[in-house]
Image (cartoon, helix red, strand yellow):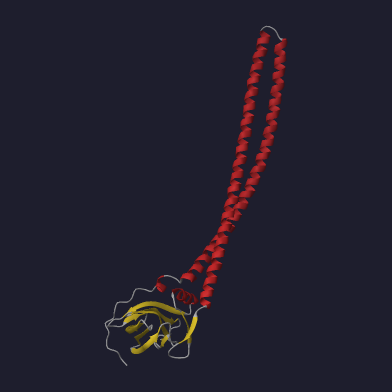
Amino acid sequence: MGTPMMQPPPEPAPSRGKIAIPILFGAVIALIGSNVYLFVELNKFRAETKKADEKILDEISKTRETTSVTATAARQNLDALRDELDAARRQAAMAAGQAKIDAEKHAEQLARRLEAEQRKAQEQVSKIGSEVSEVRQTATAATARLGEVSTEVGQVKTEVASTKAELDKTIANLKRVVGDVDSHASLIATNAKELSALKALGDRNYYEFKLTKTKQPVKIADIAVQLKRTDEKRNRFTIDVIADDKKVEKKDKNINEPLQFYVPSKARQPWEIVVNEVKKDVIVGYLATPKVQAGR
C-alpha cells in the first residue's frame, strides 16, 4: 500500500565502500602493480647494467692498451736520455777548457730533462690508476644497485603472496546464511574484514550504514529504512523498509541475518540488509544490491 509523503532526510555520507576500494583486494592490486613496475625496472636496469659492463670492459681494455703503449714509450725515452746523459758525462770528463764547460752544461740539461720525463711518466701512471679505480667504483655501484632492485622485487612478491593468501582465507571463511523471505542462502559478512572480502568478490554492490532511530525513514541507496526498535541484550531489532512505494516491516530480527526484499523496478533478484551490531536506538550493517539492474 502507499505510504504518506515523507520529507526526504539528508542523504548519509558516502559509505567507506564508495570512498575506497576494499582493503585486501586493493592491497593485492596495489602490490601486483608494484611488482609489475619493479619487474619492468629490474629488466631495464639489467639492460643498462649489461651495457655499462660492456662499456667498462671496453674502457679497461683501452686503458690497459694505453698504459702498455705509454709505459713502453716512456721507458724507451728514459733509456735514450740516460744513454745520452752517460755519453755527455764521459765527454765532459775527457774534455778540457771551454769544451769541458760546454759538455758539463749539456750534461746538466740532459739530467734535468731526464728528471722531468721521469716525473711525467709517474704522473701518467697515477692518472691511469685513478681512471681504473673510477671504472671499478662504477661497476661496484651498478652491481650493488642491481642487488637492491632484486631484493625489492623479492619482497613485493612475498607481500603479494601473503596478502592474496589472507584474502583467500577470509573469503573461504565467509558464512552462507538462508534469508528470511525464501530459501536462498547468501554469503554474509559479520565484520569489516569479511565485508571487504565480499566486495572483492564483486558479486554485489554494498552500502554500509549506521542507522539511528528517527521519526522519518532514512535513504540508503535507492530505498529508505526506518529503525523502529532495538533490544541490545538480545541483539534484536525492528525496521521498516520502503521501496517502490511499498513498506515492509522486518520485525524482531537477529544480527547477521539476511533480511530480503524485492525492488521490482530495480532488479529481479532480492536485495538484502544485514545488521552486524545493535546498540541502544542504533544499528550498524550494510545493504547488498544486485549488480544486474532490471530493464526499463
From the image, which quarter does the N terminus lie in?
Answer: bottom left
Q: Residue at x 71, y 25 (%)?
A: 79
Residue 224 vs 51, above or below: the answer is below
Residue 205 visible:
yes
Q: Residue at x 54, y 68 (%)?
A: 162
Residue 294 visible:
no
**Image quadrant assignment for residue 288:** bottom left
Residue 274 vs 27, above or below: the answer is below
**Image quadrant assignment for residue 230:** bottom left
Horizontal side, residue 196 vs residue 64: left or right? left
**Image quadrant assignment for residue 296:** bottom left
Q: Tell me residue 206's x, y (percent).
A: 42, 78
Q: Tell me residue 43's x, y (percent).
A: 59, 58
Foreground residue, 256 or 85? 256
Foreground residue, 191 or 215? 191
Residue 18 vs 241, above or below: the answer is above
Horizontal side, residue 161 vs residue 236: left or right? right
Q: Tell me residue 100's x, y (percent).
A: 68, 10
Foreground residue, 255 or 126? 255
Q: How many marks?
A: 0
Q: Tell me residue 58's x, y (percent).
A: 65, 45
**View extreme (front): residue:** 233
**View extreme (top): residue:** 97
